[in-house]
Amino acid sequence: MSFFAETLRAVGIELTAVPWGRIGLSVVLVIATITIRRVVTSAVRHGLVRTKTDPGLVILLERGSQTVITFLGLSWVLDVFGMQVSSIVTLLGISGVALGLAIQDVLKQLVAGIYLIFGRPFVVGDSIQIPVASGTVLRVDLLFTVLGKRSGETVIVPNAMFIANPVINGGSANRSRIRARVTVPLGGEMPAPIELREVRARLEELARSCAAVDTAHPITIEAEGVTKEAIVLMVSMSSVHMTDAFDQFAWAVARTMPGFTMTIVDG
């Protein structure tokens, strides 16, 4: 007897006594699986996009979560009809091992790529060197990292090379600090400390959401002055593309914090 049949019998429902009981329960399970899959996929997508995760990794994790949830839903439906799921799991396990052995080099690069994206030992714009190659990081993908040389050539390096070899990171000669003065209007009352902390936290969140801002380097927000009319804050952040960083930050502030004014100080 299936797990679901035993569970329903425990609460007084006998599937064999209900002609359409198994079909009805399977329909409910299918709807539940689709709903859970959509919710989990949406949560994974929004969570990773907010952290500016590599688009390839976002797609990989989305499809991975969809596959796992779909498999669980299918196993539940098969269990309702009394079918043996263990044999299917065994077959899939054997197939998975065989496939893993066949593409172990690709998996090695994939795991290394995930580490580079999340661990961020270097970022786009950094000048790095390993025993087999050197250059400026142009792009970090799931399987390869693209380096640019002064001659104009590009070098495509498998990600596993960065795990197996020491990496010399010289930073970025092109990265600069940009400072922007943000004026926060007040309603004629002195701000409470907690309100000031909330404003600073919100500005930092907006700065980190900008694609041109290098979040691997610190974002500092200091109060230049506080009066009954306004709070003046100095926001300092790093970027390789200074104009883009300022434009993106100014747009984010104007869109989400109406009434705030911002001017660039230097960069």
Image (tube, grey):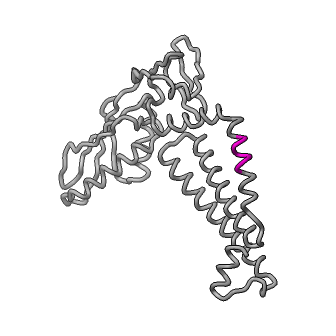
Please tell me whether residue 220 is drawn above or below residue 151 in the rendered image: below
Residue 222 drawn at (x, y percent)? 24, 42
Out of 84 and 170, give the one closest to the viewer: 84
Q: Is residue 139 left or right of residue 214?
A: right
Instruction: Please report the residue visible at 59 percent of the width from the left and 29 percent of the height from the top.
Output: 144
| Rendered location of residue 150, percent (x, y) | 51, 13
The image shows residue 30, relative to residue 114, as above or below, that is below
Q: Is residue 98 magenta?
A: yes
The N terminus, quarter of image:
bottom right
- The residue at the point 58 percent across, 15 percent down is 153
Residue 165 screen position, x and y as percent: 49, 23
Q: Position of residue 257 (x, y in %)?
A: 38, 53
* Magenta-drawn segment: 93-99
Q: Residue at x 65, y 56 (%)?
A: 68
Q: Is residue 157 left or right of residue 73?
A: left
Q: Quadrant of residue 89?
A: bottom right
